[in-house]
Amino acid sequence: MHGFMDFIFKFFPKRVQEILLVILAALLGFFFICSWPHRYMILRENLPREISMKWFMSFPSSGLVTGLMLAEDYNNSAGTYAKQGNFPKAINDYNEAIEIESNLASFYYNRGFSYTQATLYFNRGLLYVKEGNFALATLDFNKVIELKPEFFPAYGNLGIIYANQGKYAQAITVFTKAAVIDPNYAPAYYNLDKLYYQMKEYDKAWGNVLKAESLGVNIEPGFIKMLKRDSGRDK
């Protein structure tokens, strides 16, 4: 390396030296990323799967990519089973994918795994809801929030569970959190207006009705009629 640098400084003018050094730094950075075990996990959230897999399979490292591909295969088959209505098999494959991702996350210090794990837990949680297993669904949605606090759909689904269980205060908390994360998340306002109506907080119910309508949600005429009657106001 020193001989190469001496050659550059001896035979090239300063401007060319600067260009060559920039190119050299870029190449060194490229090869560092390509040989670093965490490279896939850092960029996987920002690249399409087809690109990331093709790119990084050229630089395999200790079974990492193999493990990730296996997890994604389980994820894909789980999605297929879910579409077919075979929820037990879908859940089983999500279990496998989650276990693989969790083991890889533990080995690689969890770098870059949070988003994928959160998605797996979220999808499994949705299936638990369809099976009526709200206790396990609640655990999965809370796990999503732990891994990816900005994953607002998890709050929305958790809020629906709480609302159906009559836990209105908890439901309002998570729906409000979802709306804070994404002010355009219409389902949060749609559900909040019902909850505030149940709690007889009609002004807040109207506020969420208007917000939901501004986002394109069609509120049921029957609900609007009841809200007008009980609140004594017309929006």
Image: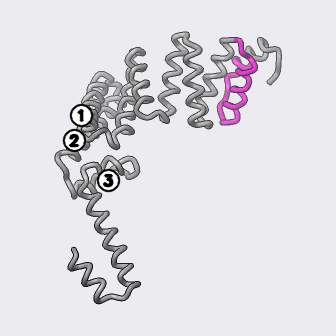
Mark positioned earlier in the residue sequence (1 or 2): 2
Q: Which mark is residue 229?
A: none
Q: Which mark is residue 103?
A: 1
Bin the neighbour count of mark 1 within 10 Å (Cα to Cα): few under 14, some 14-19, many 20 and up: some
Look at discs 1 and 3 and give the one toward the viewer.
1
Mark positioned earlier in the residue sequence (2 or 3): 3
Query: Residue 25: which quarter of the image?
Result: bottom left
Q: Is residue 234 left or right of residue 223?
A: right
Task: Specify the segment rendered in magenta.
Answer: 200-224
Q: Residue at x 60, y 26 (%)?
A: 176
- Circle 2: element type: helix
- Circle 1: element type: helix
Count how many numbered circles sit on residues in the image: 3
The quarter of the rendered structure image containing the C terminus is: top right
* Vertical placement of residue 183 versus 56, above or below: above
The residues tagged by marks 1 and 3 sit, at their Cα atoms, a distance apart of 21 Å
**Marks 1,2: beta carbons within 8 A:** yes
Residue occupied by mark 3: 52
**Amino acid type, label 2:** Gly
Q: Is residue 128 left or right of residue 204?
A: left
Q: Nearer the viewer, residue 127 or 40?
A: 40
- In the image, is residue 184 part of the stretch drawn in magenta? no
Instruction: Farthest residue to the right: give it.
Output: 233
Q: Residue at x 82, y 22 (%)?
A: 234
Query: Residue 190: which quarter of the image?
Result: top right
**Amino acid type, label 3:** Ser
Residue 184 location in percent, x, y? Answer: 61, 37
Residue 17 location in percent, x, y? Answer: 35, 82
**Amino acid type, label 1:** Asn
Q: Nearer the viewer, residue 33 or 60?
A: 33
Q: Which mark is residue 67?
A: 2
Query: Residue 21: which quarter of the image?
Result: bottom left
